[in-house]
Image (cartoon, grey):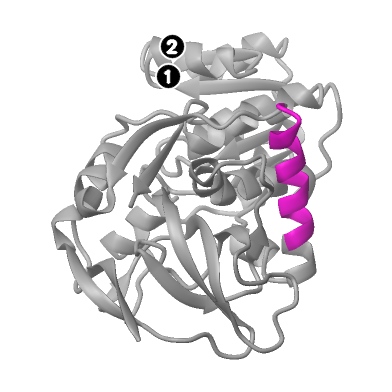
Amino acid sequence: MTTAKTAIIEAHGGPEQFRIVDQQIGEPGPGEIRIRHKAIGLNFIDVYQRAGLYPMTLPHALGMEAAGIIEAVGDGVTHLKVGDRAAYAATPPGAYTEARVMPATQVCPLPDAISFDEGAAMMLKGLTTQYLFRRTTPIAKGDTVLFHAAAGGVGLIACQWAKSEGITLIGTAGTDEKCQLALDHGATHCINYRTEDWVARVKELTGGKGVDVVMDAVGADTFEGSLDSLRPLGFMISFGNASGPVPPFSVGLLAQKGSLKITRPTLFTHIADHATCQKMARDLFEKVEVGTVKLRIDQRFPLADVAEAHRALEARKTTGSTILTL
């Protein structure tokens, strides 16, 4: 049995909770694999879990996505073999480590044309983008989407995805530089929410009609404005809580604002089925392989500096994707 350096938390709280420990790594059982990581992805869900917004049994390693090489395969696993390059976005958490044993269901063969860094940076964010545009509500060429945090990891993928499919994407971001980044990646418009009334600007850009779909991972700060940005019968996808959870609201509000529809999805429901997960990954990989979606990795931190990585993410000092290196 070998050991792997692993970032764990023993109590919920701030980034100071992280400890680097040597964790024992065994052999995979039926339906499992052991993967040696080459790069690890960082996501806001990691912050939610560390802070206790999404409580977990402690102590526990965090991290939901990574890329590496398959070291061992348990009985019943047929889509992966020893030596394969692979990447995943999966539960349970535990990616902040040099190596781990985990269920194979959501671990996907990684094409040779995609680097380990890209694989680690793209799985959770890219599969999230895939379900937002392909699996949540019909979005057709010519439709208009409002996307908050358009210069973030999911946002920059979403900007490119929308452009590749003829979808108008109106982004929001907190600086002019971040707005320009979103525009450079395919956003049709981007609004600096610190200097403009973004709800009024959305109405102006849509000729007073509002957008067809809002994709909102910011949460509390943008929720009501997002509803006000929708056209009648529009669809609100609330898929994150970067500014805190959305407070309780009366469902009658949706009727008052134009018979709106709302959903609160999570990626892990969409990828729970093995065949669906693998199909979604192939869809994403194809976008990357042909160059329609390019992964922007703007921050790299050694695994030992995971606390600093979390501080940067929470302070909204990051753009694009952040990875932990080994």
Q: Nearer the viewer, residue 323 or 44?
A: 323
Q: Residue at x 27, y 60 (%)?
A: 51
Q: Is residue 315 above or below residue 262?
A: above
Res 250 → quadrant:
bottom right
Kindly identify which residue carries mark 2.
196
Expressed as whole percent of the image width and height from the top left, the position of residue 192 reads 44, 15
Kindly identify which residue carries mark 1.
193
Q: Residue at x 86, y 31 (%)?
A: 140
The magenta stretch spans residue 281:
yes
Left or right, 17 with reference to 103: left
Expressed as whole percent of the image width and height from the top left, the position of residue 211 reads 70, 26
Q: Amino acid at mark 1?
A: Tyr
Q: Which residues, given as a range, are shown in magenta?
A: 278-291
Left or right, 315 with reference to 132: left
Q: Nearer the viewer, residue 157 or 265?
A: 157
The magenta stretch spans residue 213:
no
The answer to whether mark 2 and mark 1 are in CB contact below 8 A is: yes
Question: Helix, strand or loop at disc 1?
Answer: loop
Q: Label 1: how many residues lie within 10 Å, few (<14), some (14-19) or many (20+)?
A: some
Res 168 → quadrant:
top right
Q: Is residue 164 above or below residue 135?
A: above
Q: Residue at x 38, y 21 (%)?
A: 174
Q: Please say whether residue 138 is visible from this viewpoint.
A: yes
